[in-house]
Each structure stands twice: as structure tokens, then as C-alpha cells.
Amino acid sequence: ALARMLRRRTGLRLHDLGPLRAARRTDLLALDLTDRRSGYPLQMVVRASDAGLRVAESDVPYRPRTGKSKVTGTWRGTWQAVRDMREVLREPPVDRTAGRGTRARSGALR
């Protein structure tokens, strides 16, 4: 479901918000990421897409989790993650024609 909402918002065809991201420091800082909880990985992908940065997905090997998830292991953690991600997906896209870092006022998708 999240991948479908992300695709609608950005046009990116991703399957997962994997554990590894790589970016140039200047590009990463220019994204002005503000979420400090569960929405952070999603906000990075959404804002990178809005900024016109290349976003690619690569498979990485996973091993079974050794402990309990802090996010989906509790009702509170799950609810907070859903709220954080919903807020990120509601952000209006960056209007690249209005100057770097300017958020479009309308909620229209590009």
C-alpha cells in the first residue's frame, strides 16, 4: 500500500524503503529533512524525487530480525509510523520553477 501511495505522489516505482541510502552531502542537506521519526526514510525519498535527484532501488540481502521492532512491534509505534508517513505524503511537491526549495502552495501533483 505504501509503495502505491509513493508511486502516486512521486512517480517512483519502488517496492520497499530499504535500509541503505547514499547521497552527496550537499544534496542531502538541501532536502531540508525535518521528520525525526518513522517518516524520515519516506521524506528523504519524496523530497529527493521532488528535487529531481536520481532515486534507484537495489536488492539487498536480509536476515531474520533478531529482536522486536520498535515501530511495528507495538500499537503505539505502528500508529505513530502511519501518522508520520501520512504527513510526509501530504506535503505539497517542490515547485522547481519557483526556486530551490520552494514548496508549491497547491496540492497538485506534477
Image (tube, rainbow, N blue to C red):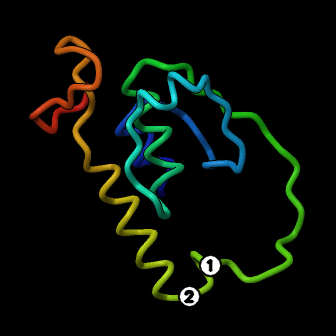
Coordinates of residue 99 in the picture (x, y in percent): 22, 14
- Residue furthest out toward the bottom: 75
- Residue located 40% across and 48% down the image: 5
Q: Give the structural element (helix, strand or loop) at label 1.
A: loop
Badge count: 2
Q: In which quarter of the image is the C terminus?
A: top left
Q: Closest to the observer: 101 or 95?
A: 101
Where 45 falls versus 2 (above or below)? above
- Residue furthest out toward the left: 105
Coordinates of residue 108 in the picture (x, y in percent): 17, 33
Name the amino acid, label 1. Lys
Q: Is residue 23 left or right of residue 77?
A: right
Bin the neighbour count of mark 1 within 10 Å (Cα to Cα): few under 14, some 14-19, many 20 and up: few
Q: Give the structural element (helix, strand or loop) at label 2.
A: loop
- The quadrant in which residue 60 appears is top right
- Residue located 38% across and 63% down the image: 84
Q: Give the number of the mark in front: 2 or 1.
A: 1
Provide the residue designation for mark 2.
74
Bin the neighbour count of mark 2 within 10 Å (Cα to Cα): few under 14, some 14-19, many 20 and up: few
- The quadrant in which residue 91 appears is top left
Provide the residue designation for mark 1.
70
Where 87 falls versus 57 (above or below)? below
Where 107 falls versus 35 (above or below)? above
- The quadrant in which residue 6 appears is top left
Q: Give the spatial CA distance, label 2 vs label 1.
A: 7 Å
Name the amino acid, label 2. Thr
Asked if labels 1 and 2 touch by Cβ distance under 8 angstroms, the answer is: yes
Coordinates of residue 80 in the picture (x, y in percent): 41, 75
Coordinates of residue 92 in the picture (x, y in percent): 22, 38
Find residue 101 and name its label.
none
- Residue located 62% across and 78% down the image: 70
